[in-house]
Image: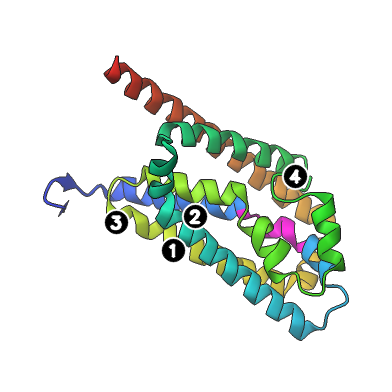
Amino acid sequence: MVLNGSMDFDLKDFLVFSSMAFSTIFFVVDPIGLVPIFISMTQSDSPEKRISIAKRATAAAGIILVVFAICGKLIFSAFGITLASFKIAGGVLLWFIALDMVRAKQTRVKTTPEEEQEGIEKEDVALIPLALPMLSGPGSISTVMVLMGQAKDWLYFIPVFISIFLTCLITYFMLRGAQYILKYLRQTGLKIIIRIMGMILAAIAVQFIINGIYDAVKMYSLVI
């Protein structure tokens, strides 16, 4: 199968990219790690309001990620940033997130203790701090931008958008049933899952950095 009259469509490569896009976005957003925080922030709210907060937070986060995914190349051009440098920066950022996940700690890349306390005290936490910066923070934003930059063809954009949608949908249902998840998995179960996700994310972060260094060396060798 040929796309755009010149590029051969590699199904295996497309499936690998699709699985990487979903796993990376899902692990960075980390809805499982957000469960205890969501419960603490909405403990005084009614079940109906908690559902409303979860719905609006995930919808807003999805919109933010889609906007940055679409506008990524414009941002690169506006600031004179190469994709190689952004891959390296994004990989380093993901590494720190993964490191906190492996240690079962709430990453400071997403939010600070002050922001969490402010969220607990706020009447409505859907947009700030849940949607931004917890769900669509620097890590997830840089991830979707790098993935879009790695896309070999327009067809590769589709898995990124689908991954954003599925991640937000799964996150909505997890936040909606946060109390039940915490009840059955308990803190120990949640930490085990988060650590496993952190290990996988760390490997993806290293791969981002390796790809970025390779692209940078290739680009500058051609210039020289």
Tags 1 and 2 touching, CB below 8 Å: yes
Q: Amino acid at mark 3?
A: Leu
Work out which quarter of the rendered image holds the C terminus and state it. top left
Q: Residue at x 73, y 41 (%)?
A: 100
Of residues 205 and 59, the one drawn nearer to the viewer in this rendering = 59
Point out the tag, 2 or 4, that comes first from the N-terminus.
Answer: 2
Point out the tag, 3 or 4, that comes first from the N-terminus.
Answer: 4
Does residue 12 appear left or right of residue 88 in this picture? left
Residue pointed to by mark 4: 108
Q: Residue at x 16, y 52 (%)?
A: 4
Please tell me the numbered disc located at residue 162.
Answer: 1
Q: Secondary structure at mark 2?
A: helix
Q: Residue at x 61, y 38 (%)?
A: 93
Residue 117: x and y in percent read 86, 59
Residue 114 in the image: above or below residue 91: below
Q: Amino acid at mark 4?
A: Arg
How far apart, in angstroms, are the residues tagged by discs 2 and 4?
23 Å
How far apart, in angstroms, are the residues tagged by discs 3 and 4?
35 Å
How far apart, in angstroms, are the residues tagged by discs 2 and 3?
15 Å
The magenta segment is 29-36
Q: Nearer the viewer, mark 2 or mark 4?
A: 4
Please tell me the numbered disc located at residue 155.
Answer: 3
